[in-house]
Amino acid sequence: MNQPVRRVLVLNVGKPTDGNVADRPEAYALREARPDYVAFVCSHAADFQAGSLRFVDDYAALTGLPPERYEVVSLEDPDDLVACYQRLVECFTDLRRRFPDAEFLADYTAGTKSMSAALVLAALDSEGRPEVQLRLVRGARGHQATVIPGTESFAPVSGVHDVRARRFVGLARLALERFDYAEAAATLDQALQRELSAALRTRLEHARNLCRAFDAWDRYELATAKTFLELYRRDWHSWLTVLDQLTSVVHAFAPGQPDARGSRLTHLDQLRDPYIAVEDILLNAERRATQSRYDDAVARVYRALELLVQLRLWLGHRIDTSDVELARLPEAWRAKLAGRAEGNGPVRLALVQAWDLLADLPDEPLAGWLATERPRLLQWTQHRNYSLLAHGFAPVTATGWHEHGQAGLVLCRAALAELSRTRVRRPLEHQQFPRADLLADLG
């Protein structure tokens, strides 16, 4: 070919009842589209049924197409939707490889119903830029419902990009069912790269931004999560309330806070429900378990149990587990830790030590719970210590999670319930992250 191919037309070919192709919609489509290259999609003659293959040369001659400017895509069974679709997918792939810079049109006016359906599906599934444009020749219908010559008009198929975009919405829903907000956001981004109606674009952007919000929250990039949720405060204000409390707790335990003993934790006293951070970590653990990331789930449950005792020791007794002030401890505990206080560094408490100390403190609402559940807590900690993300190499399997791992989650929630029962905690409402319901506005 001496001239570059800028426009490719994939054209379904039907059978004229009188053998005259000049007045057929295919001829109109060829004249209107003025393609540089044509793929004629035709049916074979079989079982005494005349196919449309024999009319290709007539169309080529009618529009002056030289042999090097067209090809024939022959369908063995024009009523076999799956076979037709597979053949046309191969056709589009090959054409895109040969003409990477061309514009692609697909006219599905003629042919069998299966041929039309297959061409539309293959065009929608053809990945690449630019996207395939669907075309249809309309007109008044006459004998055998064929278009009456002279009444034809070209009708671009409006809204087809919205149809393509909605197929990505289905993939995003699958990602959200497994709490994969990053994948869902990336999938919706792909949909947004297409030419869309203004209404659908607005809804897709809304859903994509919410996915980005919960992806950031899931990774504890809380400032980013707040930025996105603030865009829709009216609908998400209760979540923002939780997020603000959680952000304050995270800030209190962040490195680089003031060095004065306990000063980094003082603003926890101003929070309505600092224990919401414990619940949030437990919800995060459940999401990891849903993704079969059981090692990660166990690690988060451990952090939740650790944070719970850190909060109780500070809020109830002004004891900071990272820098223990011995004067605040019972006499037996002062004697026990006195030797460690002689060094230059601060006295720190490990998780089991912190539990035991909390159980020995006066007027502690969790003391009874700790006395009862200490054996189960120690057993759970032992299983956790064997895991790869703790001190061992044992993987946490699905069976291990259900038999041992989630027991820590249950224990931690029981402690939170005890704090609520004794009115030490004034719980805010918190719940698991939304899944596919984030896309409810997309139908």
Image (spheres, rainbow, N blue to C red):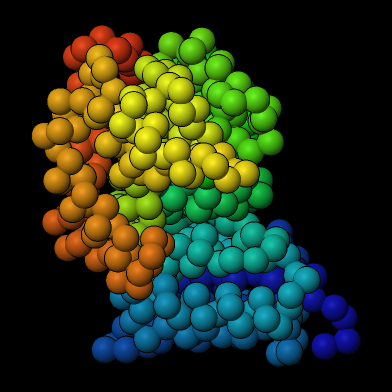
Q: Quadrant of the N terminus?
A: bottom right
Q: Position of residue 61 (x, y in %)?
A: 69, 81
Q: Quadrant of residue 353?
A: top left
Residue at 71% in and 83% down: 98
Q: Nearer the viewer, residue 323 or 219?
A: 323
Q: Is residue 261 above or below residue 255?
A: above
Q: Nearer the viewer, residue 29 or 94?
A: 94
- Is residue 134 toward the left or the right of residue 112 in the image? right
Report the residue that reaches farthest toward the left: 372
**Left or right: 132 in relation to 440:** right
Considering every residue shown, the one lying at the far right of the view is 2
Work out whether residue 137 can be spotted.
no
* Residue appearing at x 19%, y 14% in the figure: 421
As displayed, is residue 431 above or below residue 15?
above
Query: Viewed as shown, does residue 69 lie left or right of 213?
Result: right
Using the image, determine if residue 225 lies above or below residue 187.
Answer: above
Q: Name the residue rendered at 62%, 44% in the picture.
A: 344
In the depicted structure, whether residue 422 falls above or below residue 48? above
Residue 182 picture location, percent across and down: 52, 50
**Residue 87: x and y, percent?**
45, 80
Q: Quadrant of residue 281?
A: top left
Q: Quadrant of the C terminus?
A: top left
Q: Position of residue 348 (x, y in %)?
A: 48, 41
- Residue 375: tell me if it is visible: yes
- Between 158 and 253, the one lying in front of the other is 253
Of the pair 111 and 307, the residue shown nearer to us: 307
